[in-house]
Image (cartoon, rainbow, N blue to C red):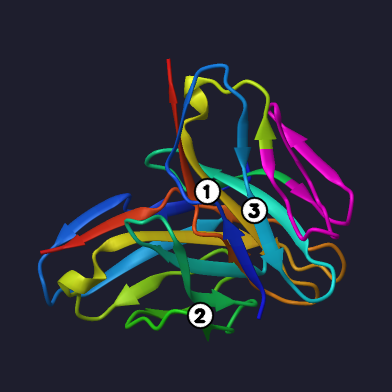
């Protein structure tokens, strides 16, 4: 079944730890995205990718980094987590089309708490 | 630049009440318009979409019509259920663009 997966679903860690949030999709989509969702629900785009070896920063500045070595995999890394990084992180993907703009498919999210 | 504005919540309704969540947008060209729903503890999922003016998107009893003259895409449902309690996001996908622009979200509570 085509889907988009995120692990872990919940993560509680101490300040200064390095973490990687995993995102994988089985739909063969070229476009992938990372959003940060604050408690007020608003979504902020922090990274996106057009395809393999392509990554771009989003609208909200973030200390995280991403990589795209394989089409299906788009991990997000924080080298040194801080309490200000506590948030919900959502991964999404969509098709590349030249005509109609397609919807995005979202993973279930990772809720990160940094103590 | 392009933007989406949706009504602030929370919206609290009794079961079987009529729902309207207002959404207006600013965009150049002809964007596609979407409503997404986020249930507690989950990611967003597409509820309905419309790709051109006067299109009506519908799903699970929800409807929204792409109104170019009023730059609106209001979400409606004739009779809400407790299971409709969620956060609803209006969004647009720019013509020729890459990103989707989301509204701030409207939380809906439906009481039995």
Pointer 2: what residue?
A: A58
Residue A41 lies left or right of residue B94; in this view the side is left
Mark 2 residue element: loop
Pointer 1: what residue?
A: B44
Specify start and end residues of the magenta stretch as a single range. B49-75
The correct choice, above or below, for B100 with respect to B35 in the image is below
C-alpha distance separating marks 1 and 2 = 19 Å
CB atoms at circles 1 and 3 under 8 Å apart?
no
Chain name for mark 3? B
Identity of the residue drawn at 33% across and 75% down: A77
Q: Residues within 10 Å of mark 2 (few under 14, many from 20)?
A: some
Q: Position of residue B91 (x, y in %)?
A: 64, 58
Q: Residues within 10 Å of mark 3 (few under 14, many from 20)?
A: many
C-alpha distance separating marks 3 and 2 = 24 Å
> Residue A103 falls in which quadrant of the image?
bottom right
The correct choice, above or below, for B43 with respect to B32 in the image is above
The correct choice, above or below, for B7 with respect to B86 in the image is below
Q: Residues within 10 Å of mark 1 (few under 14, many from 20)?
A: many
Please determine if labels 3 and 2 lie on a single subunit: no
Question: Viewer-nearest of labels 3 and 2?
Answer: 3
C-alpha distance separating marks 1 and 3 = 17 Å
Identity of the residue drawn at 59% across and 84% down: A54
Viewer-side residue, B47 vs A94: B47
- Picture quarter with the N terminus of chain B: bottom right
Q: Is any atom of residue B41 visible in this view? A: yes
> Residue A90 falls in which quadrant of the image?
bottom left
Mark 1 residue element: strand
Mark 3 residue element: strand
Pointer 3: what residue?
A: B23
Q: Magenta segment: does it hold B61?
A: yes
Identity of the residue drawn at 67% across and 69% down: A30
């Amino acid at each position: 079944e085509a889907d988009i997966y995120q692990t872990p679903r919940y993560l509680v860690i101490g300040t200064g730890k390095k973490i990687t949030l995993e995102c994988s999709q089985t739909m063969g989509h070229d476009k992938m995205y990372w959003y940060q969702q604050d408690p007020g629900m608003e979504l902020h785009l922090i990274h996106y990718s057009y395809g393999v070896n392509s990554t771009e920063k989003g609208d909200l500045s973030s200390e995280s980094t991403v990589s795209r070595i394989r089409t299906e995999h788009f991990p997000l890394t924080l080298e040194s987590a801080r309490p200000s990084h506590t948030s919900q992180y959502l991964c999404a993907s969509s098709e590349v089309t030249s005509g109609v703009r397609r919807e995005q498919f979202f993973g279930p999210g990772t809720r990160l708490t940094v103590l | 630049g392009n933007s989406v504005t949706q009504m602030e919540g929370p919206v609290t309704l009794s079961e079987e009440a009529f729902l309207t969540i207002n959404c207006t947008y600013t965009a150049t060209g002809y964007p596609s318009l979407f409503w997404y729903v986020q249930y507690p503890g989950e990611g967003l999922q597409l509820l309905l979409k419309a790709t051109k003016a006067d299109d009506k998107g519908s799903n699970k009893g929800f409807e929204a019509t792409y109104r170019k003259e009023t730059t609106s895409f209001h979400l409606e449902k004739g009779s809400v259920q407790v299971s409709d309690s969620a956060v609803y996001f209006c969004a647009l996908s720019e013509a020729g663009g890459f990103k989707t622009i989301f509204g701030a979200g409207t939380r809906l509570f439906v009481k039995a």
